[in-house]
Amino acid sequence: ENSTCVLFIMANKVLVGVKRAIHYAAKIRVKPDKSGVDVANVKMSMNPFCEIAVEEAVRLKEAGHAKEVIAVSMGPKQCQETLRTAIAMGADRGIHVETDQVMEPLQVAKALRALSEREKPDLVLLGKQAIDDDANQTGQLLAGLLDWPQGTFASEVKFDSGKLLVTREVDGGLETIRLSTPAVVTADLRLNEPRYATLPNIMKARKKKIDTFKPEELDIDLTSRLEVVSTDEPPTRSAGVIVESTQELVEKLKAAGTI
Amino acid sequence: LSFDPASGAVSCEAGVVLQTLDEYLAEQGHRVPLDLAAKGSCQIGGNVSTNAGGIRYLRYGSLHGSVLGLEVVLSDGTILGGSGATALRKDNTGYHLKNLFIGAEGTLGVVTGVTLLTPSRLKSTNVAYLACQDYESVVNTFRSARAGLGEILSAFEFQDSYALKVVLDNLPNSRSPLQDQYPFYALIETSGSNEDHDRQKLEAFLDQVMSSQLVLDGVLAQSETQANQIWSLREGVAESMQRSGYVYKYDLSLPLARMYQLVQDTRKRIGELGYVVGYGHLGDSNLHLNVSTKEASNEVLGLLEPFLYQQTREYGGSVSAEHGIGQAKLDYLSYSKSAAEIATMRKLKALFDPHNILNPNKVFSME
């Protein structure tokens, strides 16, 4: 006789990565030595796609699909502010991997792998990409390192009969895939609209804890595999030219080699 | 256009758009001392002639204090002030003529150049949106804010639930930051030079107003985007009212404790005939009371005027806190100024403009 077992699949833990990235409206300058962008005194804030990931994680918890939401951030000590924001939105606690090194996607993925092996989440939610480097690699690298299924560019995430149904935004439209857990999902713009941090939650957030780890404690290799050869500002737009007639327009286009 | 980084004084011609001036100052690490919803189109000369107020009045005061010098053309062609109008911070030599022109609505002279004292642009800004059960709580929250936030408080605005609703109904992509609906909302902004210091003060203040139940719920913007969204809920009221019908607008100064009573009385008076909203610069005791109706109606106008102005007079308030008299309120100047004051104004007008060529029939009509 077969006995049927009804499993209420619930993610026990959801790990959410949040990046402290350059604010979208900040004016940035390239460093004189062209080694990168000058981030000193530049306004930083939580990467918008990470906000969406946090919001989704909190909604999953509110819907009863998850027991605990853990926010993770990697970088200098100011990342703790970013974690506080995630906690004020509803995450239960935070983990800060402290390093002053500039983070590359592979390094972040390794740190997330180490934490995933520790915390054993059923779901890792990340933003699809950071708006400062636009890499769009961390989620995919992490899934590869963990050998977990991945649902990237998610515009909808649902639990269905023990599996994760992820609707992805792809070039041709929408694609829905079914993943078993544990899995990595990266959030796209239309997944949700992040909530504001409410005062009661901000006050509760202060009592919630943030654990700090140094990369060595997690046994991760942070050697950079990338070398920034040079960074340049986009070429300044040259002034347009006003022409007197269509004849002249055609001549100028021909001279520019465009027709 | 010139800017002195040592004193923060900027000189420009009257036609410079406020926002343009602000953007220029931003590059110097400064900002204009006033801020209003129309900043994308209003000109600094006009701001001076109308003594414009706005949302940062609470922090930076009026143009009477910020204007260091003016270049003004009088009705006989005389130019007062000259080019590069004086940029002195303190100058008590004789009468302060420039102050006569600030707020004179162009009736005493035409402002052609302005020298303005500009404050430093401070890096740390925080915006919170709070919900209160009743008007008294809003007022007490303001007093708490003044005491607890002190020098970092840069704006304190309020709006009733009707004002929020009209924005949510008419402004695309707007949403309430709070789960539930409340009768009153307050928008608090702080502005300072040190993020940590400001955050600490703000959190202590928010702790206190939440635990004492003055504030029932609220949010704190976590990014500039959220801060702008919250501001749009307050700054979008006028536009939202316009979209929803014909609007009667009133801008009154009233004793703080009694400010909202007038809104309630008006709502009762108007009944089904119109939609009444109350909002404004609570920190300056300046109420904006707007009534929208499907179309212009003499019946509604009759219910509103002179009632609102009479009530204002009774409380010793101003029939025009910041919007000026212009043409629309010619008949109501006497509700806030005595006969002696108006007579003195007429004498000044006759002195400066004997032929009545400067913006005639504004502020008062010359017989």
Image: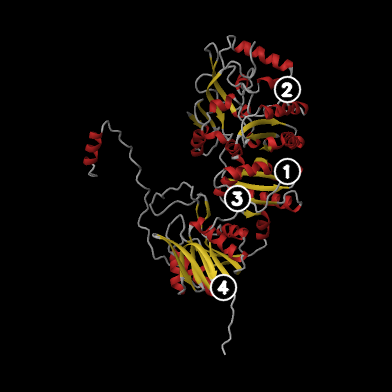
Residue under label 1: B138
| Residue A119: mark | 4
Mark 2 vs 1: CB contact within 8 A: no
Q: CA distance from mark 2 to mark 1?
A: 28 Å
**Tag 4, which secondary structure?**
helix
Using the image as rendered, state which of residue B225 and residue B79 is in the foreground.
B225
Badge 4 amino acid = Glu
The image shows residue A210, relative to residue B59, as above or below, that is: below
Marks 2, 1: nearer the viewer: 2
- Residue at 70% x, 16% y is B342
The image shows residue A226, relative to residue B102, as above or below, that is: below
User: Please, which residue is most extreme toward the bottom here?
Assistant: A1
Q: Earlier in the sequence, mark 1 or mark 3?
A: 1
Few, some or many residues within 10 Å of mark 4 (<14, 14–19, 20+):
few
Using the image as rendered, state which of residue A38 and residue A155 is in the foreground.
A155
**Tag 2, which secondary structure?**
helix
Q: Earlier in the sequence, mark 2 or mark 1?
A: 1
Marks 2, 4: nearer the viewer: 2
- Residue at 43% x, 57% y is A134
Badge 2 amino acid = Tyr
Residue under label 2: B335
Q: Specify the subunit that label 3 lies on.
A: B
